[in-house]
């Protein structure tokens, strides 16, 4: 599985801590990690608005399979990512959130608070979150006897989102071009996207804005 990590400007300094824990867990499970947001060097200022654009491009194009995002409270990134079709983002504070989201909602992104509650032992909490998020088979339900209804409802919600949303490329083309251009301006994002993108139309969209 390919996992993208993205931090916005206010929590760029936390990126090395989060990245270390994510890479440790990913290595143990055979996953690849791409650090596509701000990594503490403030090379280009990303807000949680930009994170939503980046996550949607990576997930809808098949460049990555999962996105780990966040901001100060985690709420802004959550809303930004969930604004796009093809993205199902959960809010995660502790390991049980990660486990239950994986088993019940079977989504493809998490938003974490990187400021609120990020104190003593935060790196341990994040490591345990990643272990629960990426260990075992997803979508198994919890408790097990409720699996059928949970899988059904997750599927219904996904179809509802597809129905009420615009065509993805149409939606992206309606955004402010400068907003999109800034979101995809980072070299680490570009490397991850261009090397792993599986959708020609989305690739053309990104290249046209680069």
Image (cartoon, rainbow, N blue to C red):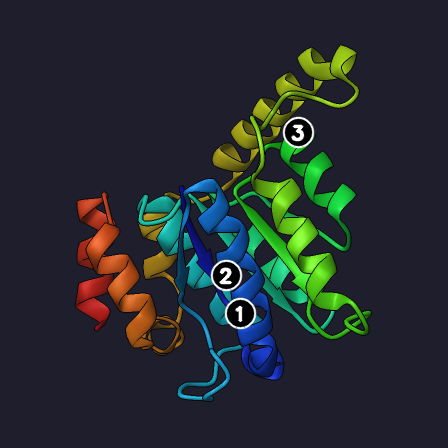
- Quarter of the view holding residue 123: bottom right
At horizontal 54% and vertical 71% (from top left) the residue drawn is 7
Whether residue 74 is visible here, answered yes or no, is no
Q: Are marks 1 and 2 in contact (CB under 8 Å)?
A: yes
Q: Nearer the viewer, residue 179 or 33?
A: 33
Provide the secondary structure element on which disc 1 rests.
helix
Q: Real-space Cα distance between discs 1 and 2?
A: 6 Å
Q: In the figure, is residue 9 to the left or right of 140?
A: left
Dot 1: few (<14), some (14–19), or many (≥20) neighbours within 10 Å?
A: some
- Quarter of the view holding residue 121: bottom right
At horizontal 37% and vertical 48% (from top left) the residue drawn is 64
At horizontal 47% and vertical 77% (from top left) the residue drawn is 38
Location of residue 115 with respect to 106 vertically, above or below: below
Earlier in the chain: of badge 3 and badge 1, it is 1
- Mark number displayed over residue 189: none
Q: Nearer the viewer, mark 3 or mark 1?
A: 3
> Which x, y percent locates residue 150?
69, 21
Q: Nearer the viewer, residue 78 or 85?
A: 78
Q: Which residue is mark 2?
A: 52
Q: Quadrant of the C terminus?
A: bottom left
Q: Nearer the viewer, mark 2 or mark 3?
A: 3
Mark count? 3
Q: Real-space Cα distance between discs 2 and 3?
A: 23 Å
Q: Which residue is mark 3?
A: 103
> Which x, y percent locates residue 199?
23, 44
> Which x, y percent locates residue 24?
52, 56
Location of residue 34 with respect to 136 vertically, above or below: below
Q: Which residue is mark 1?
A: 49
């Amino acid at each position: 599985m390919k996992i993208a990590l993205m931090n916005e400007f206010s929590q760029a300094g936390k990126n090395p801590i989060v990245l270390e824990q994510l890479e440790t867990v990913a290595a143990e499970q055979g996953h690849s990690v791409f650090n596509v947001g701000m990594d503490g060097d403030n090379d280009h200022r990303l807000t949680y608005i930009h994170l939503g654009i980046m996550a949607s491009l990576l997930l809808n194009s098949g460049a990555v399979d999962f996105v780990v995002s966040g901001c100060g409270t985690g709420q802004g990134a959550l809303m930004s990512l969930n604004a796009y079709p093809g993205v199902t983002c959960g809010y995660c504070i502790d390991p049980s959130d990660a486990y239950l989201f994986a088993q019940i909602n079977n989504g493809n992104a998490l938003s974490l608070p990187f400021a609120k509650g990020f104190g003593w032992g935060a790196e341990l909490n994040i490591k345990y979150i990643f272990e629960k998020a990426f260990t075992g088979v997803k979508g198994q339900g919890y408790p097990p006897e409720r699996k059928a209804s949970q899988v059904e409802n997750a599927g219904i919600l996904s179809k509802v989102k597809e129905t009420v949303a615009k065509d993805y490329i149409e939606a992206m083309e309606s955004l402010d071009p400068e907003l999109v251009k800034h979101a995809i301006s980072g070299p680490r994002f570009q490397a991850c996207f261009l090397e792993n993108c599986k959708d020609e139309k989305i690739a053309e969209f990104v290249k046209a804005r680069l």
